[in-house]
Amino acid sequence: MVKKSSILAIALMTSASLRLQAQEGGSVFSFLNLPTSAHVVGLGGRNISVTDDDISMGFHNPALLAGVSDKTVGLNYFTYMRGSNAGSASYAQAHGERGTWGVSAQFVGYGSMTETTASGEVLGDMNALDMALGGTYCYLLGGNWAGGVTGKFIYSHYGEFTSCALAVDLGLNYYKEESDFSFSAVARQVGGQLKAFGDHHERLPFGLEMGITKGLGHAPIRFSLTMCDLTRWKSDYYYSAGKKTSAGRIFTNHFCVGVDILPTSFLHISAGYDFRRAYEMKAAGSSHGAGLSVGAGVSVRRFNISLAYAKYHVDASTFSMSLAYSFLR
């Protein structure tokens, strides 16, 4: 007889490695915290305020679809741990003079795992997959403000265990083009499970984020600052080996900083630093390049491509690529 509790524990631990440590009390569907934009990966892995014509930014803040060209399609590919890959696809189209609607999908495939009995007998392989389907509507509110909402159906399948949920992302953005200043706030994963993995329902990885992006008028440079997990300033995660993490470390672990260099109107070069990811990776024994990321992107007529490199796991490097094409640009 298969030891179901062991299989479930392995599956949940695999999903948890996507940053479950950072979630107080634990949560399911933590794959939703992974970036789905190569530009965001290059800016440190967290950004909700860059207002470029980039459809993949809609995954991070639904209000940013306001700046996306009509009838744009986007694809993203993301390598994670060995044997694990992630991807996403999205489409956005204008609706009237102020509205934009979009549809999206994202997945993380973990490859196959060995399925065994309670005594260790190998029965074969089992597969693990996370996915989410979404629909977004964004509206220009006036006075440089835009608001957006994304409804999501979330599904996870680990061997014979499945779970599904409904969630909503709420986003707000203020952008003043004259001063190249953008401010955003996002509430992510507001919802709950429809079907649990086991007997008990678990909470979704809710997150409250705020971010700003500011360009320098006299230089082709743009800085971004993103604050995450604003509802969780105290957590058992910050206790290690019986020692309490300093208040300063707890504070900085809520920040991600990024910079874009814009030598021309069609090229960006990005770099970023995620304080929390650096802390997690150093605690796991990796110090080389922990928390750092780099990226670049080119826009040629209707076609955009962005590439980025980072480390999200001590044993593997992460490469991300985003492609977008606008039919009407």
Image (cartoon, rainbow, N blue to C red):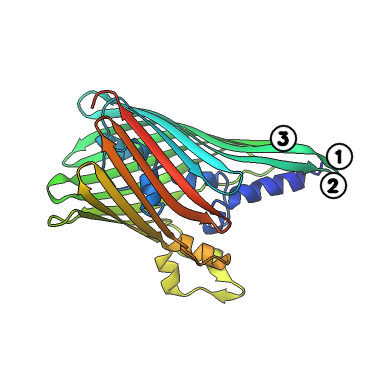
Q: Which mark is residue 309?
A: none
Q: Nearer the viewer, residue 256 or 236?
A: 256
Q: Mark 3 belongs to which amino acid?
A: Glu
Query: Residue at the spot x=85%, y=48% of the render?
Result: 120
Residue tagged 1: 1
Please name the residue that numbered disc 3 is placed on: 160
Measuring 22% from the left and 55% from the top, which residue is drawn there? 221
The residue tagged with tag 2: helix, strand or loop?
A: loop
- Do the residues bearing badges 2 and 3 touch, measured as CB atoms within 8 Å? no
Q: Is residue 221 left or right of residue 89?
A: left
Disc on the earlier residue, 1 or 3: 1
The residue to which callout 2 is attached is: 118
Q: Are marks 1 and 2 in contact (CB under 8 Å)?
A: yes
Helix, strand or loop for disc 3: loop
Q: Is residue 21 left or right of residue 147?
A: right
Q: CA distance from mark 1 to mark 3?
A: 13 Å
